[in-house]
Amino acid sequence: DAKTTQPPSMDCAEGRAANLPCNHSTISGNEYVYWYRQIHSQGPQYIIHGLKNNETNEMASLIITEDRKSSTLILPHATLRDTAVYYCIVKPETSGSRLTFGEGTQLTVNP
Amino acid sequence: GAVVSQHPSRVICKSGTSVKIECRSLDFQATTMFWYRQFPKQSLMLMATSNEGSKATYEQGVEKDKFLINHASLTLSTLTVTSAHPEDSSFYICSARGGQTRNSPLHFGNGTRLTVT
């Protein structure tokens, strides 16, 4: 599986946009980019995923660069409840649904 | 959306006893479920893939005789930690795919905090 690199931690002010970067420079053509988050002592929560095009849903937007070597998860108006560890995961189509988690980014939203 | 329920959420057991954790897909059928383990301040580690009607597939280093997995129906997988020891204390999380395609996202249960005394 392609490896991902994320900053270990980030801070964001409540109400502002949180932009979480992820580097996946070895991504191959059939690999999707998934984002999950884990609030303390809970199971991970699916946020969004994409292949090439930018994606948006009710939780967040996913911006994937044209060369697909990096992506950014955007939480448009962060709240205190968005404080969590955010995981960027690249998954090849052939591996079925299994996900391999890295260390993620601890996002802390401050009042 | 797809909901995965895990039970119990928290369990304390004595060393040498066995503990069973249940994982249910509430509004969809899951032929495959995944079991993860998470130690404090660490990321999730995949333990095994649970396949309905067949044997589970274990990751390297995970003892299949210690972590018994049964996936007897399309909505239920169980993980039994046998002869538990304090080092088995961890956060155990299950997941299942919520859609029909291979790239459908996984949905996770809320985890089971196991403490072995």
Image (cartoon, rainbow, N blue to C red):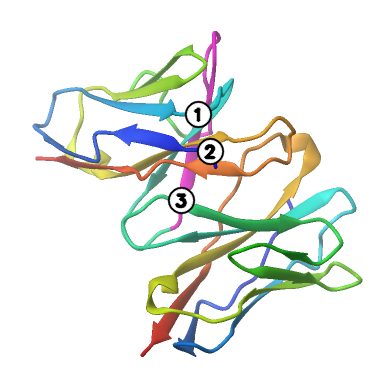
Q: Circle 3: is it few (<14), some (14-19), or many (20+) Cα within 10 Å?
A: many
Image vertical order of residue B89 relative to residue A66, above or below: above
Q: CA distance from mark 2 to mark 1?
A: 6 Å
Instruction: Name the chain under label 1.
Output: B
Which residue position is annotated with label 3?
A: B44
How far apart are the two marked residues, 3 and 1, measured between alpha carbons? 25 Å
Which callout, 2 or 1, points at the residue further toward the start of the chain? 2
On screen, residue A55 versus residue A86, left or right, reads: right
- The circle drawn on residue B117 is none
Is residue B29 found inside the magenta-colored segment of the image? Answer: no
Percent from the top left, x then y, of residue B82?
25, 22
State the residue position of label 2: B2
Looking at the picture, does residue A19 appear above or below residue A47?
below
Indicate whether residue B48 is drawn in magenta.
Answer: yes
Provide residue B14's location: percent of width, then percent of height.
8, 32
The C terminus of chain B, quarter of image: top left
Task: Give the extent of the magenta segment.
Answer: B43-60
* First of labels 3, 2 by sequence position: 2
Residues beneath discs 3 and 1 located on the same chain: yes
